[in-house]
Each structure stands twice: as structure tokens, then as C-alpha cells.
Image: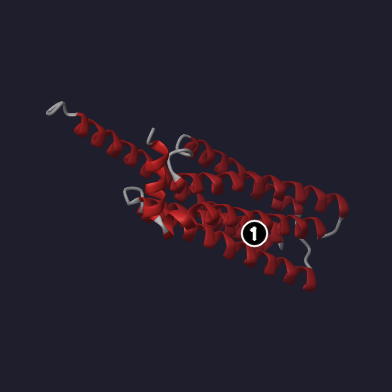
Amino acid sequence: MTGCGCNDTANMLCRAQDAARRRVLWSVMAINLALFAGEFTAGWWADSSALQADSLDSLGDAGVYLLSLAVIAGSDRQRAGAAVIKGAIQGVFGLAVLAEVARRAWFGAEPLAPIMVIAASVALVGNLVCFGLLSRFRVDDLNMRSVWLCSRNDLVNNVGVILAAALVAWSGTAWPDLVVGVMVAALFLHTSWQVLRAAWRPWRHPEADRRSLTTESTP
């Protein structure tokens, strides 16, 4: 039916949804930048690989959210391309954390458990807020799902750092901190693989994906 205003309504709803995503992404980006500054400083002070790895995760997430903001209203290929960049960023951070853990293992480290617990607990609260804000958008598209995966990983990382601090205090050695640093790096690399595997084909062959979807929807 012509003149029913259905297209106008749909466009208005899309714009409202995009505006809601932007508000949430700006909020979680600001939270993660603040967490990076606090955790990186605390990690340097506490001589903790796990805490500094967690701070890099927050910095990477802030970059991911900025990319997501740039392509919210973009084409499917642009959103897939942003997801490819996010996956690559996660992989680079994973390798960087592994290198830092190896350096600390070689030269020695004396992590301070109380500082680790305080910093990671504050980060856990901040990331719970981010996770709650992003959860409603996790099934929207590949772009928002990759963002939600980053937020989920943050919670795992924070709990890991708190556990590492408890084990450092209990054992009197730096090894629990180094082990958790390796685990955080492994999580970075796993997420990188997940996102890259999901985004690579839509980015390289968007036409093929659209044809596939059209064929599957044809009775």
C-alpha cells in the first residue's frame, strides 16, 4: 500500500536504534579508557603482568568501541571490515602480553597482591556495568557481537587477576601472576580467531553472502 508510511516508520526505528547504540558505545568507551589508565598505573606499581595485561585489554576495547561507532550506520562490508580490524587488534595484544610475561619470567618480578586485588575489583565493577549496557545489543549484528565478546572477556580477565593476587599472597611467588598473564593472552588470541573467522568472508565476499542469504530465504 502506497503512502502508508511504513518505510518512514522503519527508518525512524533504525535511527533510534543507532542512536541508542552510539550512546552505549560512548559510555563503555569512556569507562574502558578510565580503567586502562588506572589499571596500567596500578600494574606498573604492583609489578604485575596480569594486571597490565588486563589494562591493555581495556585499551583495546576502547579502540574497538571507537571502530564500532564509526561503522554503526555503515554497510555490511564496512561492519565486517571493522570486525576484522578488531580481531587483528586482539591478536596483537595477545602476542604483546605473551612477550611481556616472558620478559618478567626471565628478569624476575615481585607482584604486590593487595594492589592487584583493589585494582582488579574496581575494574570488575566497571566491566560489569559495560557488560550490562552491551548485552541488549549482542545479537544485532557482527559488529555489536564482537563488542559484546570483548566485554565478556573483560569479566573473565578481572576474575583471573583477583585469583592470581590471592595465589601470589598464598604462595609468596610471582608464578600465579605470570600464569594468569598467559591465560589472558590466550583469551585475546582465541577471541581474535573467533572474530576473524566470522568476519573474514563477509568482508572479502559480501556479494556471495547476500546471494547465499537470498537463496536460503527462497522457498
Q: In which quarter of the image is the C terminus?
A: top left
Label 1, secondary structure: give it.
Answer: helix
> Taking 130 as reference, is 88 above or below it?
below
> Taking 190 as reference, is 15 above or below it?
above
Q: Is residue 113 visible?
A: yes
Q: Where is residue 175 in the image (x, y as percent from the top left)?
A: 82, 59
Q: What residue type is labelled 1?
A: Ala
Depth check, front residue: 51 or 15: 15
- 175 relative to 30 in the view: left or right: right
Residue depicted at x 63% and y 54%: 190
Identify the residue position indicated by label 1 in the image.
Answer: 53
Q: Quadrant of the N terminus?
A: top left
| Marker count (numbered) | 1
Depth check, front residue: 125 or 92: 92
Q: Position of residue 3 (x, y in %)?
A: 12, 28
Residue depicted at x 72% and y 59%: 182
Q: Which residue lies furthest to the left in this view?
A: 3
Q: Position of residue 211 (x, y in %)?
A: 37, 48
- Location of residue 45 by image quarter: bottom right
Q: Which colour scheme is used?
A: secondary structure
